[in-house]
């Protein structure tokens, strides 16, 4: 941020994403395709870059090749101005071991901090779908003098058991307690039916982070996690503050998509987030040109509709050829839907081919899946359960190149 505080961005992108299988069988969770042409990591990187934070290290570990390749080919910044987005693989700098947790990942990468000598370190997760102006959170952090500021989003108390919950102190600013997936947490003073769920986004004063990481490394029973170890430690020290995401306003937002944030860690959440994109007035609007989400999807021809092919309430990416009928679906580049085929309420990744007369309903198909002519997915629930991965909510998922039977 030229003329402002010296900030280093660290994006935690080493997650395995087991709950998103089979989409993560061959890639890290942040590399999973979303919204047709994007990768999940593009959302956090776009937020940081749009907010003027131009030096960003992406810490990777699990099956990171496609993620590393996407970052290096897409996120090319101006070297003249000293800006960069760079993937940083696990390097075993502190001995022959991989990362033990997200805190240990940063501890093993402190050489990045020592090289840049930032005043503040922005530590964000890489696998959420949202828009956020990080400058507003940084301003609160600096003005408050906090050691760490954690972003919290208001969610219904009934959903609290799925999140780490931030319980504000009586002053409403400091973090009074951090509860990991509590069954019955207290509500907020101004909204008793809601709680603050941690978004996994933190801003640290540099010395505070370094000291906390070094202290945590000495605790044998620690899980060495940012949310599970570092935040509780700094909460006890009284230097952790909460930032209310509801107060964050992004240029170009609409009242309908203000405050949108989704953890797409499960197949059901991933599918539902896609359904949020496709309405005429979407819950999350990808077409915000004042705060764009950046990506690169290759040099492909525009989508083509031939032989009576139609698509409604859908996202159709470049390189697609539609000869059949597509409704309420998201199609990534290179998808082909043949004559007589029907695709309904589905998410199709790159180069999926749906053969003549085939039916695909309520499914997520990873790249290079070939649905033969006349095949049916999402028609016979019992058969789908026997052959494919089916989520609790009934979403049918096929992995990369998986054979359709």
Image (cartoon, rainbow, N blue to C red):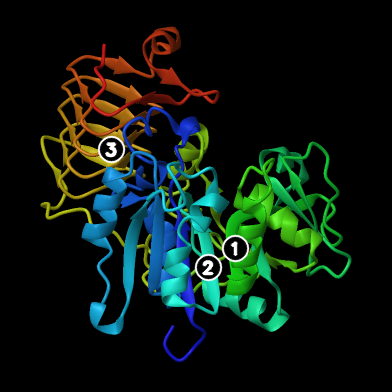
**What kind of element bears circle 2?**
strand
Q: Is residue 51 above or below residue 85?
A: below
User: Position of 77 compared to 46: left or right?
Assistant: left
Which residue corresponds to mark 1? 202
Residue 344: quadrant of the picture: top left
Name the residue at the bottom extreme: 3
Q: Residue at x 43, y 50 (%)?
A: 13
Which residue corresponds to mark 3? 349
Q: Please name which of the two marks, 2 or 3, marks the residue nearer to the observer.
A: 2
Cβ atoms under marks 2 and 3 closer than 8 Å: no
Q: Residue at x 49, y 88 (%)?
A: 4
Cβ atoms under marks 2 and 1 closer than 8 Å: yes
Q: Position of residue 399 (x, y in %)?
A: 32, 26
- Give the alpha-carbon distance from disc 2 to disc 1, as whole Å: 6 Å
Q: Residues within 10 Å of mark 1 (few under 14, many from 20)?
A: many
Q: Position of residue 291 (x, y in %)?
A: 41, 70
Quarter of the image containing the N terminus?
Answer: bottom left
Circle nearer the N terminus (1, 3):
1
Q: Of 205 and 76, which appears nearest the observer?
A: 205
Quarter of the image containing the C terminus?
Answer: top left
Circle nearer the N terminus (2, 1):
2
Which residue corresponds to mark 2? 122
**What kind of element bears circle 1?**
strand
User: Position of 7 compared to 165: left or right?
Assistant: left
């Amino acid at each position: 941020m030229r003329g402002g505080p010296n900030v280093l961005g660290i994006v935690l992108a080493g997650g395995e994403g087991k709950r998103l299988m089979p989409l993560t069988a061959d890639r890290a969770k942040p590399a999973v395709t979303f919204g047709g042409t994007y990768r999940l990591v593009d959302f956090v990187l776009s937020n940081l870059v749009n907010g003027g934070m131009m030096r960003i290290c992406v810490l990777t570990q699990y099956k990171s090749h496609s993620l590393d390749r996407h970052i290096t080919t897409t996120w090319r910044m101006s070297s003249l101005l000293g800006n960069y987005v760079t993937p940083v693989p696990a390097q075993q700098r502190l001995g022959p071991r991989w990362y033990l947790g997200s805190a240990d990942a940063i501890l093993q990468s402190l050489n990045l901090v020592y090289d840049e000598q930032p005043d503040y370190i922005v530590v964000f997760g890489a696998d959420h779908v949202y828009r956020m102006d990080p400058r507003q959170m940084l301003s609160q952090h600096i003005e408050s003098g906090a050691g760490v500021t954690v972003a919290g989003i208001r969610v219904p108390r009934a959903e609290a058991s799925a999140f780490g919950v931030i319980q504000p102190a009586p002053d409403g600013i400091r973090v009074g307690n951090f509860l990991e997936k509590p069954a019955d947490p207290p509500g907020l003073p101004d909204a008793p039916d809601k709680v603050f769920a941690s978004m996994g986004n933190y801003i640290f004063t540099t010395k505070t982070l370094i000291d906390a990481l070094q202290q945590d490394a000495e605790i044998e029973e620690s899980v060495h996690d940012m949310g599970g170890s570092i935040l509780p430690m700094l909460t006890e020290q009284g230097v952790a503050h909460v930032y209310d995401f509801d107060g964050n306003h992004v240029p170009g937002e609409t009242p309908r998509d203000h405050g949108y944030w989704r953890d797409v860690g499960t197949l059901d959440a991933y599918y539902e987030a896609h359904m949020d994109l496709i309405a005429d007035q979407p819950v999350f609007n990808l077409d915000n040109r004042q705060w764009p989400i950046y990506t690169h999807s290759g040099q492909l021809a525009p989508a083509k509709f031939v032989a009576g092919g139609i698509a409604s309430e859908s996202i159709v990416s470049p390189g697609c050829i539609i000869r059949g009928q597509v409704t309420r679906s998201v199609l990534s580049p290179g998808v082909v839907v043949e004559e007589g085929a029907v695709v309904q309420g589905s998410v199709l990744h790159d180069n999926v081919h749906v053969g003549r007369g085939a039916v695909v309903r309520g499914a997520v198909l990873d790249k290079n899946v070939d649905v033969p002519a006349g095949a049916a997915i999402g028609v016979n629930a019992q058969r789908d359960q026997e052959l494919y991965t089916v989520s609790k909510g009934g979403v049918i998922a096929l992995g990369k190149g998986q054979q359709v039977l």
